[in-house]
Image (spheres, rainbow, N blue to C red):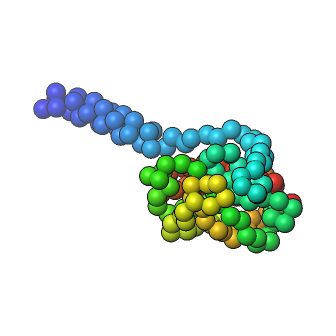
């Protein structure tokens, strides 16, 4: 009986250790660069866009800049294989200074080719506060790309 009492604490320690290892993996957080620069602009078709040329962007000019709390229309454009561009589209905004996070836009699907891109979708977005915002674009739940904008 005494041997059994010696084994119980050892089993408890082993089981607790295994449990902590499993939970440790679940608690890992992916860190982004602390300060991302505002995305570059590029031309596609007859439009100036902001984002990553040949990957992701939206029409961006003096009429479509971001002002805190003001909604505006933005036409998103995506380049890629048909299989990459199939599924719902979602944009999550993250303010780099305040860590505020919002769902900026959601659509159940992307439209076809437009302005030289393989897919597109019109959107209305409103970012609630000033600062530098990361706009993470997801297609079918997978991160497709990020556009960084400055909100006045």
Residue at image location 65% in from the left, 68% down from the top: 122
Residue at image location 72% in from the left, 55% down from the top: 45
Quarter-wise, where is residue 18 in the image? top left
Residue at image location 71% in from the left, 65% down from the top: 74
Residue at image location 64% in from the left, 41% down from the top: 32
How many numbered marks are there?
0
Q: Give the left or right position of residue 56, taking residue 3 as reference.
A: right
Measured as percent of width and height from the top left, residue 41 is found at 78, 48
Measured as percent of width and height from the top left, residue 76 is found at 65, 60
Instruction: Give the vertical position of 70 relative to 54 (above or below).
Output: below
Quarter-wise, where is residue 66 in the image? bottom right
Q: Give the left or right position of residue 86, taking residue 90 as reference.
A: left
Q: Give the left or right position of residue 65, taking residue 6 as reference.
A: right
Instruction: Give the vertical position of 117 relative to 9 (above or below).
Output: below
Instruction: Give the vertical position of 3 relative to 123 (above or below).
Output: above
Does the rendering let one see residue 96?
no
* Of residues 13 and 29, the one drawn nearer to the viewer in this rendering: 29
Q: Quadrant of the N terminus?
A: top left
* Of residues 129 and 13, the one drawn nearer to the viewer in this rendering: 129
Does the rendering let one see residue 19?
yes
Measured as percent of width and height from the top left, residue 105 is found at 62, 66
Measured as percent of width and height from the top left, residue 11 is found at 26, 33
Instruction: Give the vertical position of 125 relative to 48 (above or below).
Output: below
Q: Quadrant of the C terminus?
A: bottom right
* Of residues 33 and 88, the one drawn nearer to the viewer in this rendering: 88
């Amino acid at each position: 009986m005494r041997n059994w009492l010696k084994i119980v604490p050892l089993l408890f320690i082993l089981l607790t250790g295994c449990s902590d290892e499993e939970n440790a993996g679940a608690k890992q957080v992916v860190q982004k660069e602390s300060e991302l620069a505002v995305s570059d602009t590029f031309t596609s078709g007859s439009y100036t866009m902001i984002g990553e040329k040949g990957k992701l962007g939206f029409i961006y000019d003096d009429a479509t800049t971001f002002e805190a709390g003001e909604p505006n229309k933005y036409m998103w454009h995506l380049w890629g294989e048909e299989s990459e561009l199939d599924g719902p589209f979602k944009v999550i905004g993250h303010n780099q200074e305040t860590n505020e996070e919002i769902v900026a836009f959601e659509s159940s699907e992307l439209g076809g080719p437009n302005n030289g891109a393989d897919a597109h979708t019109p959107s209305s977005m409103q970012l609630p506060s000033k600062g530098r915002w990361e706009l993470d674009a997801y297609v079918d739940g997978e991160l497709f790309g990020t556009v960084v904008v400055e909100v006045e």
